[in-house]
Image (tube, rainbow, N blue to C red):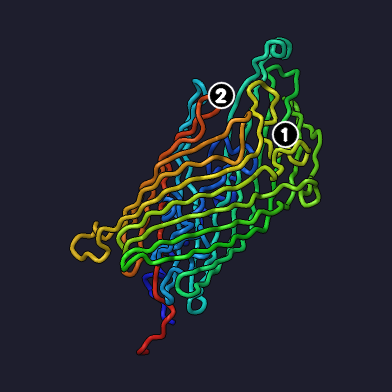
Amino acid sequence: MRLSGRIIKLLALAFCLLSPLSVRADDGATSSYSPYSIFGIGDLIIPGTAYNHSMGGVGIANRNRKYLNPLNPASVTARDTLAFMADFSVHGENKYFRQGDVRSAHNTFNVNDCIISFPIWRSSAMMVGVRPLSSTGFAYRTEYTDPAIIGKTGKISYEAEGNGGLYQVFLGAGVTFWKRLSLGAEASYTFGNIRKQFSQSFADASYSGANTYYELSLRALTGKVGLQYEQPLGKRAKLCIGATYGFGNAIGGFVEKYKLSTSTAASDTLFMHIDTLAQCSPKPRLASELGVGISLRVDDKWMLEFDYTRSDWRKSNFDNAASQFEAFNGNTSVISGKSIFSTTVSESFRLGFELVPNRNDIRYYMRTCAYRAGLYYKRDYFKLDGNDIHAFGLTLGMTLPVFRWHNGLTVALDVGQRGSVANNLIRERYVNFSVGLNIYDIWFQKPRYE
C-alpha cells in the first residue's frame, strides 16, 4: 500500500493543532459554559461532526460517500472500498444569558471529534474515534436577602463553580447486504471527571464560612446499533430510511464529597467520604436513545433529511434524594430561588438540506462547494421547577474542497436559543461555530510500478 505524502502532512498538522486543545479539555478548564450544566452530568453535546452540525445535526439516514457520519454506525459502509477517511473538528461557543434584569456572556473553544475510518473486507468497514458526551461549566455569585438572617449575621455571600465533562472512545463497524441494506454496531467507553464547588462566606469575620466540594469520576460502557435501507427512485433519486438504538447502562466510578469550614485564621475539614457508584442502589444510569430518520437524495446535486430522537432519562436516578446523588442535583444552597431539578424525556426534531451546484465544475470553484442549512428543536433531559427546557435554532454551513478526491474544510454556524426568561428561568442565546477537516485518500491499492 502506498500512502499519499500530502495526506500524511495533513494528519500531522491536524495532530499538532488538536493536541494542545486535547490537553486543555482534560486539565480542568471550562470546555463549555452554561448555568444549566450544574444539573445531572452537565449539558449533553450535540453529536456529530462539523458536517452534521451544518445540517441541523441530522445523519441517521445519511449515506454520503465523501464524509464520515458517526451518528449511525451503519453509514460507515457508504464509501469507496479503497478509501481511508478521517475527520477532525473543533467547536466554539458564544453565549449570551439573561435572567430578569441580569445579563452576562461567555465564550469557549474546544475539540469536537477525532475519527478515522477504513474498509475491512468488500462491503464492510469500521471507524474509531473520540468525542465529547457532556460538558460542565458554570460560575455564579449571589447573596442572601432574608432580613431575618442577615440582620443577625451580616452580609452572606454564596458562590458556585464547576467544570469538567464526559468523553467517549468508540469503535464501530458496518456491513452492507444486497447493495441496499446496511447494518452497523458500535461499542463506546464513557469516561471523565466533573468538579463542583459551593461556597458560603460571611462578611462578619466572627462567623466561619463553609465550602462543599464534589469530585465525580465517572465510567460507563455502552453501545449502539443502527440500520439504513436505500431504495432507488427512478434513475436519479434515492430514498434512505435509517434507525438507531443507543443502549443505556449503569454509571460506575465514584463521587468524593468533602466540606471545609473556613475562617480568616484557618480551614478545618468537617467531613470527607467517597461513595462508590457501582455499589450504591439505585445506580445512576445513562439513558437509552431511539432515533429514526428519512432522507431523499437526487444524484450528487442535493439532499434533504429529517431525523427524530427520543431518550427517557426518568430512570437515570440523577434526581434521587439519596446522599450518593447529591452531586447530580445541582445547587446545594437553601436560598430563595433555588430550582428543583427532575429528569424527564428528551427528544429532538432535526431537518437538514445540502446543495452542490456542480461538483465537477472546472471553471468556477464556488460551484464545486457544498452548501447546507438546517433547523432543529429539542427538549432537554431535565425539568426545573416542573418547567421543560427547550432549545431551537438555525444552522448554516459549507464544505470547501481542498486538493483532490473529497478532502475538504467544513465550516458550520449554529444560531439559536435555549430556555426563556419566564418562570425565573435563564434564557440562553448563542452563536456557535464548528470547523472540521475531512480527509479522504485512496490507500488500499497495489502500485503497478515500483
Whether residue 352 sits left or right of residue 245 in the image: it is left
Q: Is residue 174 visible?
A: yes
Whether residue 314 sits left or right of residue 349 in the image: it is right
Q: Is residue 16 visible?
A: no
Residue 137: give x, y in percent of width and height: 57, 40
Foreground pick, 26 / 69 = 69
Is 19 above or below relative to 120? above
Q: Quadrant of residue 358?
A: bottom left
| Residue that badge 1 annotates | 212
Q: How many marks?
A: 2
Residue 389: give x, y in percent of width and height: 55, 35
Residue 111: give x, y in percent of width and height: 49, 52
Give the mark, 2 or 1, whose residue is nearer the N terminus: 1
Q: Nearer the viewer, mark 2 or mark 1?
A: 2
Q: Residue furthest left?
A: 363
Going by the numbered disc 1, the residue's amino acid type is: Thr
Residue at 75%, 40% (x, y): give it.
257
Is 97 above or below relative to 91? above
Residue at 59%, 53% (x, y): give it.
167
Foreground pick, 123 / 234 = 234
Residue 196: give x, y in percent of width and height: 66, 38
Residue 65: mark in rendering: none
| Residue that badge 2 annotates | 423
Q: Residues within 10 Å of mark 2 (few under 14, many from 20)?
A: few
Q: Residue furthest front?
A: 234
Q: Quadrant of residue 67?
A: bottom left
**Image quarter (top left, top right, bottom left or bottom right) of the C terminus:** bottom left
Q: Residues within 10 Å of mark 1 (few under 14, many from 20)?
A: some
Question: At numbered mark 2, what does the secondary structure look like: helix, strand or loop?
Answer: helix
Going by the numbered disc 2, the residue's amino acid type is: Asn
Q: Mark 2 to mark 1: distance in Å?
A: 28 Å
